[in-house]
Image (cartoon, rainbow, N blue to C red):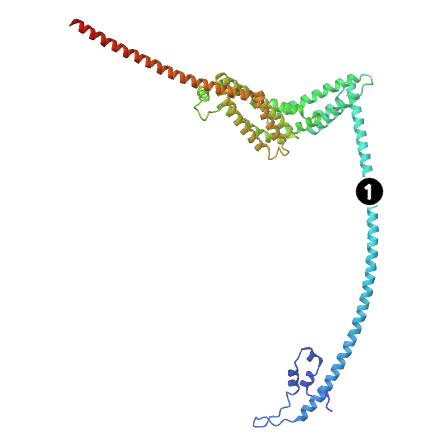
Amino acid sequence: MATLYDLDPQTRELLTLDTFLKQITVKEFVEGLTADHTIQESNGRTAAINPKPYIRTFEASLEALGRISAELNSREQKIQYDARQADAAHQRTVAATEAQCHDLANEFSDLDLLVSEVASTTTSLGEAVDLVSRQRNRAASSQFIIKCYISFLENDPSIVEGMRTGSFEDQRQCAITVRQLLRFARKINNIPRASVARENIEKYAEMVERELLKTFDKAYRSADMNSMKAVAGILTEFNGGVSVIQIFVNQHDFFIMKDKLLHESVIEDDNLWQKLCDPSCEDPPFDTATKELLDEIRATVKKESLIIKRVFPHPDSVLRVFLQRLFAQTIQQRIELILSHAKSISTLAYLRTLQNAHSEIGALVEDLKAILKPDLDTGGGLSMLLDQNMQDLFVPYIENRQYIDTERRNLQELGSAMLASFNNYHLSRKTTKNHKLLNKLGTVTGRERWAKNKNTGN
């Protein structure tokens, strides 16, 4: 029987496992086995087929294929065995890992509980440390206040005087100390000379406030915004900032110059009042000086709102006082002036002036809201204040049916004037007719007399 080694090298190479791993087809395999068994004659023609080489080759191939099949079966069994062993090992590993994860989760929970307990303990300890620190600071502050109080009891403010004449931060500490001393002195009445100490502290507090206000006024006149901001902050801590707001508003150039704006000579515009009294004027004008005043108020609020926002810790409080002063003093006085003058001329002029004033001030209020809303009127309190101020401004002219009565009186006056014109017109026409009739009668009588004289003479 032929063996694999009786075959040629090409056939032996074909009968290996690597050949079948290349996914060779049956046709290609058979053609490879029989490739060299064809006998060629000398004239190039194919000779008769000799079956022996084919038989030997196929026998050897079958033997080789059997060995390859057996080898593959052996490998498959070994691989299946190894796979079962690996799967069993994997299952054991998964079970062990699951147990370890469970143990790790338990350990993590225990650790988390421990950390929570430590954090709670640390928090309590931190709170205790903070409490002790606050108590220590409070004790030190109390000790310093008592020391300062004793010095004022002896009329010696040197301790706080050094702070008052120092930097702005020192002045702030001085203001805080004096405020605490005032509160402390007002509670103590059962020691000798307590009233003396309280009086000395109150005088010194007045002096501190007065000097800070002078510093603020000086900084305001020199446009030193940083100093203004520092002093405003100090006075806000000292007394809520009431005094610094008052000095800022009261000494503002706009209110100082108000007398010029409210002088009566600015309403002496005869052409304006003639148009206001004319019922045929469809678009009665408004007082020019009052318009200029309202425009100046717009510009002033726009400018001063920026300064107030930069200087004061609570700008809305300052703007509230500033706006109230504008309406209660400047605008109200101006409206009273022009309405009083209009009323002295005619009821129609008064009503038209009142209507124009309401329209112009309403427009002013809306413009001021637009100026303040982006940054300074976040809660809408200033807008409500503006609406309330405008309402309060016109309440005296419309309450208790005043406006209705004035409108009725105006209609009566206009009706009376029209009827008077109508009566005068017809009276003048009647008088003219009477004169024409008399003239006509006189002419007829003259003609008759002439005719009579003529007949008599004849």
Q: For the point 20% across and 6% down, which residue is it?
A: 452
Crowding around mark 1 (Cα neighbors within 10 Å: few <14, some 14 to 19, many 20+) is few
Q: For the point 83% across and 45% down, which residue is it?
A: 118
Q: Residue furthest top?
A: 457
Q: Quadrant of residue 52?
A: bottom right
Q: Quadrant of residue 83?
A: bottom right
Give the secondary structure at mark 1. Answer: helix
Which quadrant would the N terminus be assigned to in this image? bottom right
Reply above or below: 218 against 443. below
Q: For the point 54% across and 22% down, which residue is it?
A: 404
Residue bearing mark 1: 122
Q: Position of residue 256 (x, y in %)?
A: 57, 21
Q: Position of residue 402 (x, y in %)?
A: 55, 20
Q: Amino acid at mark 1?
A: Thr
Question: Can the viewer see residue 242 in this picture?
Answer: yes
The residue nearer to you, when weighing 215 against 130, is: 130
Q: Position of residue 350 (x, y in %)?
A: 50, 20
Question: Can the viewer see residue 252 in this picture?
Answer: no
